[in-house]
Image (spheres, grey):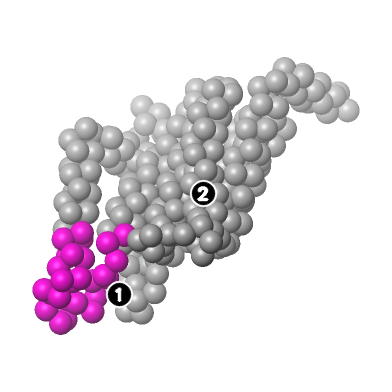
């Protein structure tokens, strides 16, 4: 039996992924999300009506939109876990998952902005906020469309047939899972102590940038080629733009996300359009280096 087969981290990854992708597990997760959303909405309504006792009344928010934001946060956590496991399959499919996450983040911010509106908004007084909601919502829709187009443009390069490369990516996935657990625990503890807003996605995307660079170097080790290096480096640039959008204002963040999506489409189109020429150039360069 090969080393790849008996390596315990790889077996650990395979077991965790089987449990994660089990239909029964997914049903339990989404059932729990429904229960949490209903309970949080009920708690907010009770707090608004003044029916919660004092120790809980100061903790539970009074805005009904907070329940929606919490629901989106929980969905995003599930999507991030899916991103962690899909890295071992394909880096390109992981980028599709990142577009999904950013589209959901933009929709979540749209709901946050809607909660700031009056029950009877007027164009004269609320047009800046209405414009912000429109830009953020449309940006999320564009990212959804970019994801579909990117998947159609994506061309597999045969990495999935290399056992060593798959094993290395499973190690990276386990590392991301560890960061996910530690970062989530730290963020929850900080919120409980200080009451500050969650910064989990900022932390995770910062780690994801360095993970993309690690994937670039790993890909070079198993399949050295300029095309793969440039593609994976371009993915790292797109991830960096998405990370920058999280710390920016809504309009700036939305535009950065759209630009990151457009960059991904341009990168995928260029590789699919000129893949043979790029591959020929790389092979010629390799042959020239061997003859020198």
Quick one: 167 or 143, which is closer to the camera? Answer: 143
Magenta stretch holds residue 49: yes
Q: Which mark is residue 101?
A: none
Q: Which of the two discs, 1 and 2, sits closer to the camera?
A: 2
Picture coordinates of residue 25, whole percent (x, y)? 20, 39
Q: Is residue 92 left or right of residue 79?
A: right
The secondary element bearing badge 2 is classed as: helix
Q: Quadrant of the N terminus?
A: top left
The secondary element bearing badge 1 is classed as: helix
Q: Callout 2 environment at 10 Å: few (<14), some (14 to 19), or many (20+)? A: some
Residue 59 in view of the camera: yes
Q: Earlier in the sequence, mark 1 or mark 2?
A: 2
Cα separation between marks 1 and 2? 33 Å
Residue drawn at x 34%, y 51% as measured from the top left: 72
Picture coordinates of residue 52, whole percent (x, y)? 13, 74
Residue 209 in view of the camera: no
Quick one: 235 or 102, which is closer to the camera? Answer: 102
Query: On the image, numbered disc 1 is attached to which residue?
Result: 192
User: Vertically, is 98 above or below 128?
Assistant: above
Residue range (magenta): 40-65
Residue drawn at x 21%, y 32% as measured from the top left: 23
The number of numbered badges drawn on the structure is 2
Q: Quadrant of the C terminus?
A: top right
Query: On the image, numbered disc 2 is attached to which residue?
Result: 134
Picture coordinates of residue 218, whole percent (x, y)? 58, 40
Residue drawn at x 23%, y 79% as measured from the top left: 58
Q: Is residue 277 left or right of residue 257?
A: right
Q: Is residue 33 left or right of residue 141?
A: left
Picture coordinates of residue 175, whole percent (x, y)? 43, 51
Quick one: 4 or 77, which is closer to the camera? Answer: 77
Magenta stretch holds residue 277: no
User: Vertically, is 213 above or below 51?
Assistant: above
């Amino acid at each position: 039996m090969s080393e790849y087969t008996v390596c315990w981290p790889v077996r650990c990854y395979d077991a965790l992924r089987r449990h994660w992708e089990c239909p029964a597990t997914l049903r339990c997760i989404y059932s729990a999300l429904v229960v949490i959303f209903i309970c949080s909405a009920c708690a907010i309504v009770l707090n608004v009506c003044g029916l919660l006792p004092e120790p809980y009344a100061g903790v539970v928010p009074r805005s009904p939109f907070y329940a929606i934001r919490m629901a989106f946060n929980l969905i995003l956590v599930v999507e991030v876990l899916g991103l962690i496991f899909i890295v071992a399959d394909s880096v390109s499919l992981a980028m599709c998952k990142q577009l999904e996450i950013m589209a959901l983040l933009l929709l979540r911010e749209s709901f946050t902005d809607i909660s700031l509106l009056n029950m009877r908004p007027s164009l004269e007084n609320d047009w800046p906020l209405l414009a912000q909601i429109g830009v953020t919502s449309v940006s999320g829709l564009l990212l959804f469309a970019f994801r579909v187009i990117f998947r159609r443009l994506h061309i597999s390069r045969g990495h999935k047939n290399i056992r060593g490369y798959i094993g290395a990516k499973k190690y990276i996935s386990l590392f991301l899972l560890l960061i996910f657990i530690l970062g989530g625990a730290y963020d929850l503890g900080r919120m409980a102590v200080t009451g500050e807003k969650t910064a989990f996605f900022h932390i995770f995307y910062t780690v994801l940038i360095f993970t993309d660079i690690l994937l670039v170097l790993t890909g070079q080790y198993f399949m050295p080629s300029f095309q793969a290096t440039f593609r994976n480096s371009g993915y790292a640039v797109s991830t960096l733009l998405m990370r920058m959008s999280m710390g920016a204002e809504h309009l700036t963040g939305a535009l950065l996300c759209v630009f990151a999506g457009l960059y991904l489409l341009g990168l995928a189109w260029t590789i699919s359009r000129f893949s043979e020429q790029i591959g020929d150039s790389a092979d010629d360069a390799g042959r020239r280096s061997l003859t020198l």
